[in-house]
Image (cartoon, grey):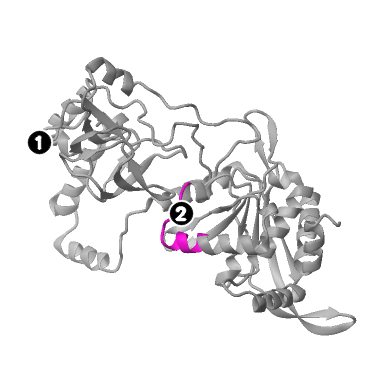
Amino acid sequence: MRYMFKFPDIGEGLEEGKIIEWYVEKGQSVSSGDALVKMETDKVVTDIPSPKSGIIVQRFGAIGETIKVGNTLVELDIEGVEAAAAVSLAQEKPKEAITEAIEEKGFGVVGTMEVAGEGSYLPAGTEGLEQAEKQVSKTKKVLATPVARAMAKDFGLDINQLSGSGPAGRVTSKDVQKRAHQAKTEIRINNPELGGASSSQQQKNAKHNELIEIVPITQIRKTIAKNMLRSKQNAAHMSVMDEAEVSELVEARQIINEKLKDIRLSYLPFIIKAVAIALHKHPVMNAELDMENERIIYKKYYNIGLAMDTEEGLVVPVIRDADKKSLIQIAREITSFSERASARKLSLEDMKDGTFTITSFGSIGGYFAVPVINYPQSAILGIGRISDKPIVKNNAVVVGKIMPISMSVDHRIVDGGEVARFLNLVLEMIKDPIMLLAYEEGLI
């Protein structure tokens, strides 16, 4: 029996993905769980496994092609499944996404993602109704509405060459109108008698085109753009800046690193640890405002997201239970995340459940900034580059190690006084590692 496996929503609000590599060929036998295709989503590069065992009848989509969620990836021939059973299988639905208040989870690369419920990871979903789609012939016939087919005929367009924006890639009348408009524009541009560019103008345009490069936007960049705008539109950003004299931290780090063999501590583990401890005492900084249900969700787990710059864009892996981990454990996780982020090997699990985010723009030379909140979190802390500055110490002017701090909060939920108290506590522990140890051990 034929089974149509469609590109599933794997549980973080996915809308589309790009085919990077096919692992299967037509006629190949696969077992449930075997990888079918490698897809680049807006957050990670991941393998999509087969939900059923069977034989590959047809693949849909070429390498480099973008596939919408709900579009068919492969057609499987499932041996020993009768028609009624196939329809029943196709109608199975995954469990609802998790919506528990305090355990409400999810953010990924630069934004949020809904977390799938049990049993819904890479589900078959609603695909597979044998009568819903016909077997694709050698001359592929696209899905289209009757109106769209009639309009395409009137405009002289081959509807099988159009990309559809409707459900399951169905071509709609809007798709036809858009392509017809593009065709008219192309004719006008290339025909001076119709008001298009002359030969000399076309030469100028060609010369101009040599000076620019057009690159398709990546899935991750789409999400960065979408979530940055979402954050600015949905949170009342307020930013605070300060400086910390961290000469004692610099000295303590140097002493510790001299004793370590297989790893070196950066300043980030100290900052992450200080933030995690401070969040215990200032829970609103670790909370989320749910305006739709008129409530504040206080999260009693302390997962610190670390914004990392990669060639593909910004990613935010999460250090879970940072309050319970040692500096060395945190340092090892940072190193692992950094290596995997550069190789684009971070998983969805690495980038969800964050409750607070830290961004270290100082690592590439920045001083102060106004970081954008990783919505729906309530705050983000930015760390600038440590530099030497003159300071007054014991009534004398000396050279101090100054670390600039930038912090943005959602002013709808966090008041200015609370920001100041939170930052004061964080800076107290950053300035003096002994105070960090004292707070960690519960001595203060």
Q: Count every numbered label the image shows and give the total.
A: 2
Position of residue 17 in the picture relative to residue 301 (left or right): left
Quarter of the C terminus within the rendering? bottom right
Whole-percent x and y of residue 381?
A: 66, 57
**Image vertical order of residue 271 relative to residue 112, above or below:** below
Q: Which mark is residue 346?
A: 2
Quarter of the N terminus within the rendering? top left
Whole-percent x and y of residue 349?
A: 50, 46
Q: Which of 10 and 151 is in front in this view?
A: 10
Secondary structure under tag 2 reads loop
Residue 331 shows up from this direction? yes
Name the image quarter holding residue 291.
top right
Residue at (51% x, 50% y) in the render: 350
Q: Which of marks 2 and 1 is nearer the N terminus?
A: 1
Name the image quarter holding residue 235.
top right
Residue wearing tag 1? 139
Whole-percent x and y of residue 215?
A: 32, 58
Q: Quick one: label 1, few (<14), some, or many (20+) residues within 10 Å?
A: few
Residue at (46% x, 37% y) in the render: 11
